[in-house]
Amino acid sequence: MSKKLYCIVIDDEPIGRELIVNFVNTVPFLDLKASFEDPVEALAFLHSHDIDIVITDINMPNISGIDLIRSLPKQPAIIFITAHRDFALDGFENGVVDFLVKPVAYDRFFKAVTRAKEKISMSSGKEKKEPQIVPDRIFIKANSKLVKILLEDILYVEALGDYLKIVTNNESYTTLATLKSMESNLLPPNFLRVQRSFIVKVTSIKSVSGNVIELNNGKAITIASNKKEELFNLLGI
């Protein structure tokens, strides 16, 4: 992608906003169009300007970063910045391409905007292709080729905006698809959608503590309250 990507920065904290603005100005493929202390002003700007990337804090007065992106008729690539890790899952469910926790290091910021650039590039002129699924395997498009994944090897599937991250015993893959397309094929008793962003293989669950499950590979995932009873029944608890 040769053209620069238009972006804005939103943060009600001046020091944090200045730091991200300085980061943006060092990235060759970014063009900072504006920065805002007031998210309401930013929202008005977004309704009248075409912006590729929005870098926004979540905890702000008047309107949160999550509510801001939900109100946009056309959603740009979103990068959330916040001091609260608990917002991560909600953010990714709403199409966020990355989630940064304060204090933000430059290398982590650069990784996030590069990921946003790649998403915009992949989405440009392409239709979303759902995985092709047969009873014991799926074929996904990853790294410009079709990849076969055996269902028995899948540990979990995570929704990341317009993409899916499929983690197996040995590798992980990212593909342009929806979690809904997977949910209709990864069914109980072998798999369960434990919350909006995750489907897990039941036999990969190592432990349960409160509303958090830990998988055999160490991954911790929050369980939705309305899924706990079904999960416990599958686990025989």
Image (tube, rainbow, N blue to C red):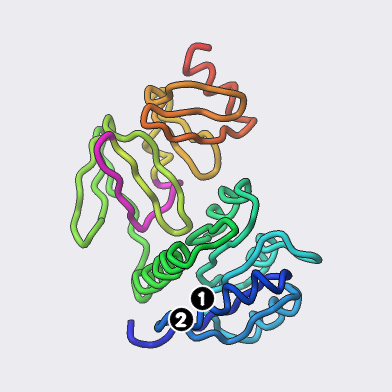
Which mark, by number, is residue 26? Answer: 2
Which stretch appears magenta? 169-181
At a point 43% along the width and 26% down the height, the residue shown is 188
- The answer to which image quadrant residue 91 occupies is bottom right
Residue assigned mark 1 = 23
Quarter in which the N terminus is drawn: bottom left
Residue 192 is left or right of residue 64, and the answer is left
Residue furthest right in the image: 62
Against 236, residue 105 (above or below) is: below
- How many other residues sit within 10 Å of disc 1, few (<14), some (14-19) or many (≥20)? some
Across and down, in percent, residue 185 comes to 37, 37
At a point 79% along the width and 65% down the height, the residue shown is 61
> The disc labelled 2 sits on which kind of residue?
Thr
206 magenta-colored:
no
Residue furthest top in the image: 236
Across and down, in percent, residue 139 comes to 24, 47
Figure label count: 2
Q: Are marks 2 and 1 in contact (CB under 8 Å)?
A: yes
Across and down, in percent, residue 24 comes to 51, 78
Secondary element at image label 1:
helix
At a point 55% along the width and 43% down the height, the residue shown is 196
